[in-house]
Amino acid sequence: MTAAIAASTQMSGRGLRPYDPRRDMFALASLIEIGFPGRLEEAGERLIRGMRFFGRAGWLGAVLGRWVLPPAAFPYGYVWEQNGQVVGNASVLPVRGFPERWVMANVAVRPEYRGRGIARDLVRACLELTRRRGGRKVILQVDFGNEAALALYRSQGFQMLSERRTWRADARRLELQVASSEKARPRLPQEWRQQWALARRLYPEGVIWPYPTSAALFRPLHLERLGRLEEPRNWIWVDDERILGSLTHRCGPTPGTLRLILVVEPAVRGRAESDLLAVALGGARTRAREYVLDYPLGQVEDLLRRMGWRPQRDLIWMGIDL
Protein backbone atom coordinates (compact mmCIF):
# COMPACT_ATOMS: atom_id res chain seq x y z
CA MET A 1 0.00 0.00 0.00
CA THR A 2 2.81 2.43 0.87
CA ALA A 3 4.43 1.91 -2.53
CA ALA A 4 1.11 2.67 -4.23
CA ILE A 5 0.65 5.84 -2.20
CA ALA A 6 4.21 6.96 -2.94
CA ALA A 7 3.77 6.34 -6.66
CA SER A 8 0.52 8.29 -6.80
CA THR A 9 1.99 11.21 -4.87
CA GLN A 10 4.99 11.42 -7.16
CA MET A 11 2.70 11.55 -10.19
CA SER A 12 0.74 14.41 -8.64
CA GLY A 13 3.82 16.37 -7.57
CA ARG A 14 3.47 15.54 -3.88
CA GLY A 15 5.89 13.55 -1.76
CA LEU A 16 5.48 10.81 0.83
CA ARG A 17 8.82 9.52 2.06
CA PRO A 18 10.31 7.91 5.19
CA TYR A 19 11.33 10.18 8.05
CA ASP A 20 15.09 10.77 8.05
CA PRO A 21 16.41 12.43 11.24
CA ARG A 22 19.52 13.60 9.40
CA ARG A 23 17.45 15.97 7.27
CA ASP A 24 14.03 16.14 8.93
CA MET A 25 14.58 16.51 12.69
CA PHE A 26 14.47 20.31 12.78
CA ALA A 27 11.45 20.43 10.47
CA LEU A 28 9.63 17.81 12.54
CA ALA A 29 10.15 19.85 15.72
CA SER A 30 8.59 22.88 14.05
CA LEU A 31 5.71 20.81 12.70
CA ILE A 32 4.90 19.36 16.14
CA GLU A 33 4.73 22.86 17.62
CA ILE A 34 2.38 23.98 14.85
CA GLY A 35 0.21 20.88 15.12
CA PHE A 36 -0.09 20.86 18.92
CA PRO A 37 0.02 24.51 20.07
CA GLY A 38 -0.08 24.93 23.84
CA ARG A 39 -0.65 21.20 24.42
CA LEU A 40 2.90 19.98 25.02
CA GLU A 41 3.90 19.01 28.54
CA GLU A 42 7.29 19.78 30.05
CA ALA A 43 8.86 16.62 28.63
CA GLY A 44 7.49 17.48 25.19
CA GLU A 45 8.90 21.00 25.34
CA ARG A 46 12.32 19.63 26.25
CA LEU A 47 12.13 17.20 23.34
CA ILE A 48 11.31 20.00 20.90
CA ARG A 49 14.22 22.13 22.14
CA GLY A 50 16.59 19.19 21.80
CA MET A 51 15.39 18.31 18.31
CA ARG A 52 15.84 21.91 17.20
CA PHE A 53 19.35 22.08 18.65
CA PHE A 54 20.61 18.85 17.11
CA GLY A 55 18.49 19.18 13.97
CA ARG A 56 20.40 22.29 12.92
CA ALA A 57 23.57 20.18 12.61
CA GLY A 58 22.15 17.76 10.04
CA TRP A 59 23.69 14.30 9.95
CA LEU A 60 26.20 15.16 12.70
CA GLY A 61 23.40 16.32 14.97
CA ALA A 62 21.48 13.11 14.30
CA VAL A 63 24.51 11.04 15.31
CA LEU A 64 25.22 13.03 18.47
CA GLY A 65 21.54 13.33 19.32
CA ARG A 66 21.18 9.58 19.71
CA TRP A 67 23.32 9.85 22.85
CA VAL A 68 21.16 12.59 24.36
CA LEU A 69 17.63 12.66 22.95
CA PRO A 70 14.88 10.13 23.80
CA PRO A 71 13.66 7.58 21.23
CA ALA A 72 10.76 9.89 20.31
CA ALA A 73 13.24 12.00 18.33
CA PHE A 74 14.11 8.98 16.17
CA PRO A 75 10.77 7.35 15.37
CA TYR A 76 9.73 5.23 12.45
CA GLY A 77 7.33 7.01 10.18
CA TYR A 78 6.83 9.26 7.20
CA VAL A 79 6.90 12.90 6.24
CA TRP A 80 5.06 14.67 3.46
CA GLU A 81 7.25 16.98 1.44
CA GLN A 82 5.90 19.67 -0.87
CA ASN A 83 8.13 22.00 -2.86
CA GLY A 84 11.09 21.10 -0.67
CA GLN A 85 9.22 21.76 2.59
CA VAL A 86 8.06 19.17 5.13
CA VAL A 87 4.35 19.91 5.55
CA GLY A 88 3.12 16.72 7.24
CA ASN A 89 4.29 13.90 9.48
CA ALA A 90 3.13 10.75 11.22
CA SER A 91 5.34 8.66 13.52
CA VAL A 92 5.16 5.23 15.15
CA LEU A 93 7.27 3.62 17.85
CA PRO A 94 7.16 0.22 19.56
CA VAL A 95 6.34 0.29 23.26
CA ARG A 96 9.43 -0.64 25.24
CA GLY A 97 9.12 -4.20 26.51
CA PHE A 98 6.02 -4.91 24.39
CA PRO A 99 7.21 -5.26 20.77
CA GLU A 100 3.76 -6.07 19.36
CA ARG A 101 2.26 -2.87 20.81
CA TRP A 102 3.05 0.36 18.95
CA VAL A 103 2.20 4.02 19.51
CA MET A 104 1.25 6.44 16.75
CA ALA A 105 2.13 10.06 17.47
CA ASN A 106 2.88 13.45 15.95
CA VAL A 107 0.26 13.19 13.22
CA ALA A 108 0.38 16.78 12.04
CA VAL A 109 -0.10 18.74 8.83
CA ARG A 110 0.57 22.43 8.32
CA PRO A 111 -2.74 24.37 8.35
CA GLU A 112 -2.50 25.53 4.74
CA TYR A 113 -2.21 21.92 3.51
CA ARG A 114 -5.02 20.37 5.53
CA GLY A 115 -8.09 18.88 3.89
CA ARG A 116 -6.11 17.29 1.03
CA GLY A 117 -5.89 13.72 2.38
CA ILE A 118 -2.26 14.09 3.49
CA ALA A 119 -2.89 12.97 7.08
CA ARG A 120 -4.91 9.99 5.84
CA ASP A 121 -2.08 8.77 3.60
CA LEU A 122 0.50 9.30 6.36
CA VAL A 123 -1.58 7.26 8.82
CA ARG A 124 -2.11 4.45 6.31
CA ALA A 125 1.60 4.30 5.53
CA CYS A 126 2.48 4.11 9.23
CA LEU A 127 -0.02 1.32 9.84
CA GLU A 128 1.49 -0.70 7.02
CA LEU A 129 5.01 -0.03 8.30
CA THR A 130 3.99 -1.22 11.78
CA ARG A 131 2.46 -4.39 10.35
CA ARG A 132 5.63 -5.16 8.39
CA ARG A 133 7.73 -4.78 11.54
CA GLY A 134 5.65 -7.21 13.54
CA GLY A 135 3.30 -4.84 15.32
CA ARG A 136 -0.10 -6.25 16.16
CA LYS A 137 -1.75 -3.28 17.85
CA VAL A 138 -1.42 0.48 17.38
CA ILE A 139 -2.67 2.94 19.99
CA LEU A 140 -2.86 6.72 20.03
CA GLN A 141 -4.26 9.64 22.01
CA VAL A 142 -6.55 12.39 20.75
CA ASP A 143 -7.55 15.56 22.57
CA PHE A 144 -11.19 15.43 23.60
CA GLY A 145 -13.22 17.51 21.17
CA ASN A 146 -10.78 17.23 18.24
CA GLU A 147 -13.49 16.03 15.88
CA ALA A 148 -11.36 16.21 12.73
CA ALA A 149 -8.73 13.88 14.21
CA LEU A 150 -11.37 11.53 15.61
CA ALA A 151 -13.04 11.29 12.20
CA LEU A 152 -9.70 10.57 10.54
CA TYR A 153 -8.77 7.75 12.91
CA ARG A 154 -12.23 6.20 12.87
CA SER A 155 -12.12 6.15 9.07
CA GLN A 156 -8.92 4.09 9.28
CA GLY A 157 -10.39 1.55 11.70
CA PHE A 158 -9.37 2.92 15.11
CA GLN A 159 -11.82 2.41 17.96
CA MET A 160 -12.17 4.28 21.23
CA LEU A 161 -10.61 2.49 24.20
CA SER A 162 -11.05 4.99 27.01
CA GLU A 163 -11.68 8.63 27.91
CA ARG A 164 -9.28 9.97 30.53
CA ARG A 165 -8.73 13.24 32.35
CA THR A 166 -5.26 14.04 33.66
CA TRP A 167 -5.23 15.72 37.07
CA ARG A 168 -2.35 17.36 38.92
CA ALA A 169 -2.07 18.43 42.55
CA ASP A 170 0.51 20.26 44.64
CA ALA A 171 1.68 17.69 47.19
CA ARG A 172 1.97 20.38 49.89
CA ARG A 173 -1.51 21.82 49.38
CA LEU A 174 -3.59 18.72 48.83
CA GLU A 175 -6.55 18.70 51.23
CA LEU A 176 -6.93 15.07 52.22
CA GLN A 177 -10.10 14.02 53.97
CA VAL A 178 -10.16 11.60 56.87
CA ALA A 179 -10.98 8.10 55.65
CA SER A 180 -14.71 7.52 56.16
CA SER A 181 -14.24 3.81 56.83
CA GLU A 182 -11.62 1.20 57.60
CA LYS A 183 -12.02 -0.45 54.23
CA ALA A 184 -8.83 1.14 52.86
CA ARG A 185 -5.50 -0.30 53.98
CA PRO A 186 -2.01 -1.18 52.67
CA ARG A 187 -2.01 -4.16 50.35
CA LEU A 188 -0.41 -7.38 51.51
CA PRO A 189 2.18 -8.94 49.17
CA GLN A 190 0.04 -12.03 48.58
CA GLU A 191 -2.90 -9.88 47.41
CA TRP A 192 -1.18 -8.48 44.34
CA ARG A 193 -2.79 -10.90 41.88
CA GLN A 194 -6.28 -9.82 42.96
CA GLN A 195 -5.27 -6.19 42.57
CA TRP A 196 -3.88 -6.88 39.11
CA ALA A 197 -7.02 -8.78 38.09
CA LEU A 198 -9.17 -5.79 39.09
CA ALA A 199 -7.05 -3.41 36.99
CA ARG A 200 -7.06 -5.73 33.97
CA ARG A 201 -10.82 -6.11 34.09
CA LEU A 202 -11.57 -2.39 34.41
CA TYR A 203 -8.74 -1.08 32.21
CA PRO A 204 -7.70 -3.73 29.67
CA GLU A 205 -6.30 -0.93 27.47
CA GLY A 206 -3.81 0.08 30.18
CA VAL A 207 -3.49 2.23 33.29
CA ILE A 208 -0.30 4.13 32.36
CA TRP A 209 0.17 5.38 28.83
CA PRO A 210 1.29 3.66 26.62
CA TYR A 211 1.77 0.38 28.48
CA PRO A 212 -0.70 -2.49 28.84
CA THR A 213 -1.98 -3.41 32.29
CA SER A 214 0.94 -5.69 33.10
CA ALA A 215 1.74 -7.68 36.21
CA ALA A 216 4.96 -5.70 36.70
CA LEU A 217 2.97 -2.69 37.91
CA PHE A 218 1.54 -4.61 40.85
CA ARG A 219 3.95 -7.47 41.57
CA PRO A 220 5.55 -6.96 45.01
CA LEU A 221 9.16 -5.91 45.23
CA HIS A 222 11.66 -8.30 46.80
CA LEU A 223 11.92 -6.19 49.96
CA GLU A 224 8.14 -6.04 50.20
CA ARG A 225 7.96 -9.83 50.16
CA LEU A 226 10.45 -9.92 53.02
CA GLY A 227 8.48 -7.34 54.98
CA ARG A 228 11.32 -4.81 54.88
CA LEU A 229 9.74 -2.14 52.73
CA GLU A 230 9.02 0.68 55.17
CA GLU A 231 6.80 2.77 52.90
CA PRO A 232 3.87 0.98 51.18
CA ARG A 233 3.46 1.46 47.44
CA ASN A 234 0.05 -0.20 47.09
CA TRP A 235 -3.23 0.26 48.94
CA ILE A 236 -6.55 -1.49 48.52
CA TRP A 237 -10.20 -0.84 49.37
CA VAL A 238 -11.86 -4.04 50.59
CA ASP A 239 -15.52 -4.80 51.19
CA ASP A 240 -16.81 -8.23 52.16
CA GLU A 241 -13.30 -9.64 51.57
CA ARG A 242 -13.31 -8.44 47.95
CA ILE A 243 -10.86 -5.89 46.56
CA LEU A 244 -13.03 -3.22 44.96
CA GLY A 245 -10.44 -0.47 44.64
CA SER A 246 -6.70 0.07 44.67
CA LEU A 247 -4.10 2.80 44.53
CA THR A 248 -0.49 2.40 43.43
CA HIS A 249 2.17 5.06 43.15
CA ARG A 250 5.11 5.15 40.77
CA CYS A 251 7.66 7.73 39.70
CA GLY A 252 6.03 10.41 37.60
CA PRO A 253 6.81 11.64 34.08
CA THR A 254 9.14 14.39 35.33
CA PRO A 255 11.47 14.74 38.35
CA GLY A 256 9.63 15.61 41.53
CA THR A 257 6.31 14.11 40.43
CA LEU A 258 4.59 10.98 41.69
CA ARG A 259 2.13 9.17 39.43
CA LEU A 260 -0.90 7.62 41.11
CA ILE A 261 -2.71 4.63 39.59
CA LEU A 262 -6.25 4.67 40.96
CA VAL A 263 -8.57 1.78 40.06
CA VAL A 264 -12.09 1.63 41.50
CA GLU A 265 -15.14 -0.50 40.75
CA PRO A 266 -17.93 1.68 39.30
CA ALA A 267 -20.32 0.55 42.06
CA VAL A 268 -18.18 2.15 44.80
CA ARG A 269 -16.87 5.21 42.99
CA GLY A 270 -17.26 8.33 45.07
CA ARG A 271 -16.49 6.42 48.27
CA ALA A 272 -13.37 4.39 47.65
CA GLU A 273 -11.33 7.17 46.00
CA SER A 274 -11.47 9.46 49.02
CA ASP A 275 -10.50 6.68 51.43
CA LEU A 276 -7.64 5.42 49.28
CA LEU A 277 -6.15 8.88 48.74
CA ALA A 278 -6.45 9.64 52.46
CA VAL A 279 -4.65 6.52 53.69
CA ALA A 280 -2.08 6.47 50.88
CA LEU A 281 -1.04 10.12 50.92
CA GLY A 282 -1.99 11.25 54.41
CA GLY A 283 1.14 9.84 56.03
CA ALA A 284 3.30 9.39 52.96
CA ARG A 285 6.97 10.21 53.40
CA THR A 286 7.66 11.35 49.88
CA ARG A 287 9.81 14.02 48.31
CA ALA A 288 7.35 14.52 45.48
CA ARG A 289 6.31 18.10 44.85
CA GLU A 290 3.40 17.16 42.64
CA TYR A 291 1.01 14.26 42.12
CA VAL A 292 -0.28 13.18 38.70
CA LEU A 293 -3.45 11.14 38.25
CA ASP A 294 -5.24 9.83 35.14
CA TYR A 295 -8.86 8.95 35.80
CA PRO A 296 -11.97 8.24 33.70
CA LEU A 297 -13.45 11.43 32.33
CA GLY A 298 -16.48 12.66 34.25
CA GLN A 299 -15.87 10.56 37.38
CA VAL A 300 -15.68 12.02 40.95
CA GLU A 301 -14.63 15.39 39.55
CA ASP A 302 -16.23 17.42 42.36
CA LEU A 303 -14.41 15.33 44.96
CA LEU A 304 -11.04 15.77 43.28
CA ARG A 305 -11.52 19.52 42.87
CA ARG A 306 -12.41 19.91 46.55
CA MET A 307 -9.20 18.12 47.47
CA GLY A 308 -7.13 20.50 45.36
CA TRP A 309 -6.66 18.53 42.14
CA ARG A 310 -6.47 20.59 38.94
CA PRO A 311 -7.70 19.22 35.59
CA GLN A 312 -4.96 19.43 32.99
CA ARG A 313 -5.99 17.62 29.83
CA ASP A 314 -8.78 15.42 28.48
CA LEU A 315 -7.68 12.63 26.16
CA ILE A 316 -9.34 9.85 24.21
CA TRP A 317 -7.36 6.63 23.90
CA MET A 318 -7.89 4.82 20.59
CA GLY A 319 -6.53 1.58 19.17
CA ILE A 320 -6.57 -0.71 16.16
CA ASP A 321 -5.64 -4.39 15.84
CA LEU A 322 -3.54 -5.15 12.78
Image (cartoon, grey):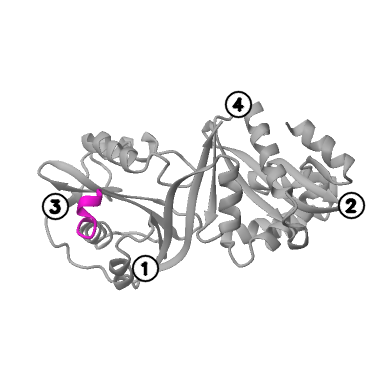
Mark 2 Cα-neighbour bin, 10 Å: few <14, some 14–19, many ≥20: few
**Residue 187: percent from left, percent from top:** 22, 44
Q: On the picture, is 273 further left or further right than 179?
A: right
Cα distance in 3D space between marks 1 and 2? 46 Å
In this view of the protein, can residue 29 be seen by the observer? Answer: yes
Q: Which mark is residue 309?
A: 1
Do tag 1 and tag 3 residues touch (Cβ < 8 Å)?
no
The amino acid marked with disc number 2 is Gly
Earlier sequence position, callout 1 versus callout 4? 4
User: Which secondary structure lies at badge 4?
Assistant: loop
Mark 3 Cα-neighbour bin, 10 Å: few <14, some 14–19, many ≥20: some
Q: Is residue 270 magenta?
A: yes
In this view of the protein, can residue 54 be seen by the observer? Answer: no
Identity of the residue drawn at 22% across and 37% down: 191
The amino acid marked with disc number 4 is Gly
Earlier sequence position, callout 2 versus callout 4? 2
The residue to which callout 4 is attached is 134
The residue to which callout 3 is attached is 183
Task: Please state which of the two labelled residues, at mark 1 or mark 2, is closer to the viewer.
Answer: 2
Relative to 299, say whether 100 is above or below: above
The residue to which callout 2 is attached is 84
Give the magenta range: 265-272
Task: Please state which of the two labelled residues, at mark 1 or mark 4, is closer to the viewer.
Answer: 4
Find residue 216 and report its image quarter. top left
Earlier sequence position, callout 3 versus callout 2? 2
Do tag 1 and tag 2 residues touch (Cβ < 8 Å)?
no
Task: Please state which of the two labelled residues, at mark 3 or mark 2, is closer to the viewer.
Answer: 2
